[in-house]
Every structure is written in structure tokens, then in C-alpha cells.
Amino acid sequence: MKNSKVFALIHVIGFAFLLLCAGIFSSCKVTLDDDSDLKVNGTVRGEYNDKIREIPDIVVEIIENGSSYKRLTYTDEYGWFEFDDLKAGSYTLRFTDTDGDKNGSFEQHTERLSLDRRDYYFDPIILKKLEKAD
């Protein structure tokens, strides 16, 4: 008789524990949607003073394809750029040298990419030197 009461008590406690766990886990949600916090970053390099170097002050634009969404940033002194808080989608990046006197003048360059639940790193973007017309 005593064993059956202990056995019944264990079943009641186990059932209560299962209900508690079900309540806890049903209130926790992990969602991956199009509003993910994604990043695009990388380094921009080009030939400057006869060496391939990181290029500062390059304008980097990110444009969401099929929409009016557009942001821009500049490369830092190490040629690094970064965009964060991006949602999944298809984008075009445009790299433009607006300070040719300082950097040596580079051709505009574009890259297309698709963000889908993970960050995107460019390793590195190499800009071509702008050929001067005689």
C-alpha cells in the first residue's frame, strides 16, 4: 500500500513537472524573419603609390533591389566599411571614389549580393585604377 502511494505521488509530481515545462517552453519563441539584424562589411583596396593598399574615404552605398531603400557610408582609414540592421533581401553595393586627389582615382565598382539569415563579408573589394585620358 505504501509503495503504491509513493508511486502515485511520483506520477503526480512528474505530471506537474511536465505541465510546468510545457508552460515555460511554450512562452519562449525563436523567430527568424525578414527583419533580421544582418550585417554587410568588408575592406576596399586599390593600387596607390605602386602598392595595393586599403583605401580610405570611398563612398559605399547599399541599395535594396526593387525598393527605394538606400544607405551610404565611407570607408575608414583602413578601408573598412560596415552596414548593420539590414533585413534579408537582394542588394547592390556601389563603391565610388570621390576624393581622387587623395587616393589616386579609382573606377566606380558595383557588387550584387543576397542576404539570407547570415551576415555577408567582402574579402576584399579591389578597385581598378581610373585610366586618365590624354
Image: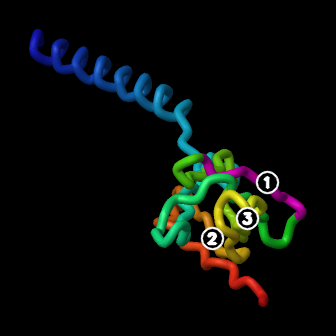
For the residues marked 3 and 1, what is the alpha-carbon distance in whole angstroms? Answer: 22 Å
Q: Nearer the viewer, mark 1 or mark 2?
A: 1
Sequence-first tag of 3 and 2? 3
- Residue at which label 1 appears: 71
Rendering coords of residue 44 (x, y %) = 56, 63
Give how far across and how far down residue 46 sits, in percent.
55, 69
Task: Please give the residue where the numbered disc 3 appears in the rendered image.
Answer: 100
Residue with the mark numbered 2: 114
Mark 2 and mark 3 in contact (Cβ < 8 Å)? no
**Residue projecting furthest to the right:** 68
Mark 1 to mark 2 CA distance (whole Å): 16 Å
Measured as percent of width and height from the top left, residue 66 is found at: 84, 72
Residue mark closest to the camera, 3 vs 2: 3
SS class of the residue under badge 3? helix
| Quadrant hosting residue 110 | bottom right
Q: Residue at coordinates 67% horizontally, 45% vertically from top-left?
A: 85
Look at the image and name its color scheme.
Answer: rainbow
Disc 3 + disc 1, Cβ < 8 Å: no
Q: Circle 2 — which element?
A: strand
Secondary structure beneath dot 1 equals strand
Compare residues 87 and 64 and report the one nearer the observer.
64
* Crowd rating for badge 3 (residues with CA inside 10 Å; few <14, some 14–19, many 20+): few
Q: Earlier in the sequence, mark 1 or mark 2?
A: 1
> At 37% across and 28% down in the image, what residue appears?
18
Task: Please tell me which residue is depicted at 68% across the width and 73% down the height of the picture.
Answer: 106
